[in-house]
Image: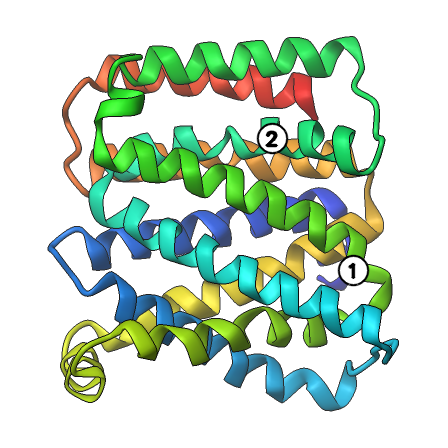
Amino acid sequence: MLEFFNNWIVLAVLAGLFSNAFNFFNRYILKDDADYLTYAWFYEALRIIIFLCFLPFDRFIDFNLTTILWLLGYGLLEVACIYTYMKMHAFSHLSISTILSRTRIVWIPLIAFFFLSESLNLNQYLGIVVIFAGVSVAVAPHKLLLDKGARFANIAAFLIALETVVLKIIVPMASATVINIAMSVPSVLIFPIFMKNFRQRISDFFKKNLLVKIVAVIANVISSYLLVYALQKGDVSRVMGIYQGMMIVSVLGGIIILKEKEDILRKILGTAITLIGVLLLT
């Protein structure tokens, strides 16, 4: 059994499945005009509590001003990321936002090219073109700018890609647990400033689907750790290809379980094309 879970393919598949479970629960929670800002605060607060449990066993930090500034910047970037990410799930079908969010793996190599001088090869350029083709098939091009949910999905994809590049920079500076705590602290402190009737909103938030909300956050934490372990054991390109390939679960979950029946053929075809682009890019 232990050998089974030491296989990087298994770890990558499980990481992808838990990540997609997190996305599914988010859409389930937010699709009925839920308070996305309160949920964003709850998500970050619960993450801190969970990661604090691991801190005694994983507390490395190269303590200096540079590290502190990078961690602070990473946390402030997370404020924008989680805000747009939750609004994406509030206003966009899961089967659409899942496809649009794959554009983050287009932005990551492009941002890394400018900030980290990482070069792209022919397959990656081709993958970028194919992913955008898949997105255009799944979502009518005019909706990419006019549809509110699509706009937030595109903004979230870019911000998360930028966050990923920053993460690559700060990984040598601190342990995964310290980084995740630092990532969530600014959101927990800043969001209440912009939330009217904060205590009442938190009270109302805890009255509905609390267990589902807790399970969603736990799924995200599990996915984060599994992905790290998969990357430790397997090649980055193959791990990320499998991890991103699990997007099909979210698309089908949105269509079948959440009854997102509009433009089913476009969504399925767009998903297939996007997956080809993901494989080329990774």
Could you say which quadrant of the image residue 138 lies in? top left
* Residue 172 visible somewhere in the drawing: yes
**Image check: 253 left or right of 260?**
right
Task: Name the residue: 32% across, 33% down.
Answer: 151
Q: Nearer the viewer, residue 152 or 53?
A: 152
- Mark 2: few/some/many CA within 10 Å (<14, 14-19, 20+): many
Task: Name the residue: 55% across, 31% down.
Answer: 245
* Label annotation for residue 251: none
**Image check: 257 left or right of 10?**
left
SS state under label 1: helix
- Which three-letter amino acid code belongs to the residue tagged 1? Ile
* Label annotation for residue 170: 1
Give the position of the N terminus as an image quadrant: bottom right
Task: Name the residue: 81% across, 43% down.
Answer: 234
Residue 241 percent location from the top left of the image: 65, 31
* Residue 174 visible somewhere in the drawing: no
Task: Name the residue: 22% across, 54% down.
Answer: 28
Could you say which quadrant of the image residue 32 lies in? bottom left
Does 196 appear above or below 252?
below
**Image check: 210 left or right of 275?**
left
Comes first in the chain, label 1 or label 2: 2
Residue 247 percent location from the top left of the image: 46, 35
Residue 182 percent location from the top left of the image: 63, 74
Does 214 appear above or below 228?
below
Give the position of the C terminus as an image quadrant: top right
Could you say which quadrant of the image residue 62 lies in? bottom right
Q: Which residue is mark 2?
A: 107
**Number of numbered markers:** 2
